[in-house]
Amino acid sequence: MKLLGFLSLLIISSAVSFGQSKFGKVKCDSFEVAAANTDIALVYKKGKVGIYNKAAANYLFKRSEGPILHLQGTKTFLKLSTGNLEAYSLNEDATALVIEGRAKDEILFQGKFGEKPNFRIDGNLNGKEGKAYKSIFDTRSSAPINYGAKRINKNLILITNNRKEEFDPFAEPLKSIIDPKKDSTVTDPESGNIMAVYPPSKPGHNRSGIYNLKTKSWFVLPKYSAINELSDGFALERLSDNGLVYSFLKMNGQYMLRDIPFETIKSNEKELLALLGVAQIDLYAAANQLHPINFFNRPAQYHLVRHFNNKYQLVNLQKKLNYVTQPKDMMTYNRDFNYFIWIENDSIYFTQNALQLALPMGAGKIVLTQTDPLNRKSFELFGMINKDTVYQKEMGDFGLFKEDRNLSIEVDATNKDEVIISNQRLYSTFDELKEIDREEGFVDELIEGYSPKSMEVESSAIWKKENGTWIKKTVDYAGITRLPYGYLAKTGAYAENDERGKRLVNINAHYLVLNKEYKAIPYLDVYDFDNAELLPYGLVLCLNNRCAFVSNDGVLLTKFEWDDFSLEGGKLKALRFAHEGADEFLWEEREWLDSTAFFDLPK
């Protein structure tokens, strides 16, 4: 039986190869009917392919070297070559082909049901020259209709052809055949409930694959719902009888994983890394890295992965492998406010929903400020080069929780090979503290705006480009400020009170001075400090209620024994006060001047 089947296959193949097929009046080696219109077919003859209309008895596209692919389930044909990618679609009467786009590397159609798709041609939206379509989001995985072609290398072309199941939410029940005036109904035999019968939904399809121009055959058969490009291969997703399964195919055609259920892969770190094709995977918390006390108590859902080619990408691994973003040179994300900061082609981008601002690396800063701490809709976004504002926009609701206060984000890209992301934010819960006289039933509001909990969110960090790769160089802080000789970093404070206002938990903020290698600088053998204030002429560091002064070249000028610093006659003036309990005249209520000293500032 096996031999007979093999001989039959040879006979069929021979019939196709030696021109024993006919489509309409055209004799050919073989043909492929377009399912959308059975009068249309791709006809193959003597190594060339054309598109023929049997009803009209003419070629809609004359035979050429090809290849030409029909995207089943659509009216679209793709002509592939090492030169250009071309997309054609049938007109309404199926009597002509209309060219939808010509690209060197990518044509991608995206749209909603019932609408003509938008399309991206070589990075330009709808083919408009000069309007670069730069996006952080991996839109191919989110649109209900996706089809097109993308060049991977000289020989391989990624063919996307996916459509989700379509149903009409406004459809009316079908009319009864017996009584057209009534709706069709069906009775559930178990419950006895009577339900209306609605028109069936239009089935979707998943027919993405990878075509090999050199062999003129499929490198990956068109049967996948998603194909994700990795640094040395592809993650292939398809729906099988066993549910969602994944394969990992290397560029050399070797499968490292094949049709493995997603839940199995998730529980195996080695297989997960293989599927993702990445060198590293890091957990991302709800708002980057929060304070050690999980204030929101929400599980993380995103992972930041670093590919072997040192590109960063955000993925969601909750129910399936979902690439949230496209690979970028550097990327960070804040889930609470849904903004991305990313670097591509020596430009830095700030993206929040539909808003996007970009600056050349090394040019300046991107700053978002809350202009009124009590108004969650009072924001301004600035793009600044040196001290000049090149972009300014007032923003509406930035997605803050009602308890948020004092949000500010600064992206310092004044150094071409370094980015400082300082996201300073105070989060507090607000309540009213009340005193109740149980005998009289009297309620006295003691404090309005009482805060049972408050914290400073830690989501600030420094990234640096080393040997062409962007690396996160610091842990997450509550805020980071650039100094002439390094950086001032602040950890987040946390406080929690009971219903009577008694302090239960109190974690104070600490300040660290980092050098340009991002290591903490000790002053008098101390690394972290209780408070800090940055002045134009230096830095004030405080420890145990006394302060010292560090000049703008990073040199400690005083001991930790002063309370106030100012400039006087070109010198640093230091003041020390005697605090409550002194026998002398009190200066400014509870303090009096104890001593004064002057120090030379470095020139």
Image: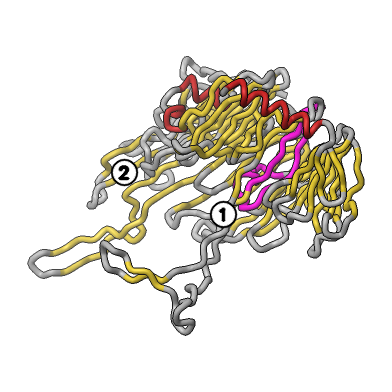
Q: Which residue lies furthest to the top in this view?
A: 525
At a point 86% along the width and 43% down the height, the residue shown is 27
Mark 2 and mark 1: span between their CA atoms?
Answer: 54 Å
The residue furthest bottom is: 181
Residue 368 visible in image: no
Would you say residue 305 sits in the magenta stretch? no
Q: In this view, does 223 lie above or below 524?
A: below
Q: Nearer the viewer, mark 2 or mark 1?
A: 1
What residue is drawn where x is 63% and y is 18%?
254
Q: Residue at x 87, y 47 (%)?
A: 26
**Which numbered disc flags the more N-terminal residue, 2 or 1?**
1
> Number of marks in the image?
2
Residue 305 on image: x %, y %: 57, 29
Q: Quadrant of the N terminus?
A: top right
Tags 2 and 1 touching, CB below 8 Å: no
* Amino acid of disc 1: Pro
Which dot marks residue 597? none
| Residue 177 in view in this figure | yes
> Residue 447 is drawn in which quadrant?
bottom left
- Bounds of the magenta span? 135-162
- Position in image of residue 396 (x %, y %): 59, 61
Say what amino acid the circle numbered 2 marks: Glu
Q: Magenta stretch: residue 149 in it?
A: yes
- Circle 1 sits on which residue? 203
Q: Quadrant of residue 418?
A: top right
- Residue nearest the viewer, comparing 434 with 11: 11
The residue wearing badge 2 is 496
Q: Is mark 2 on a helix, strand or loop?
A: strand
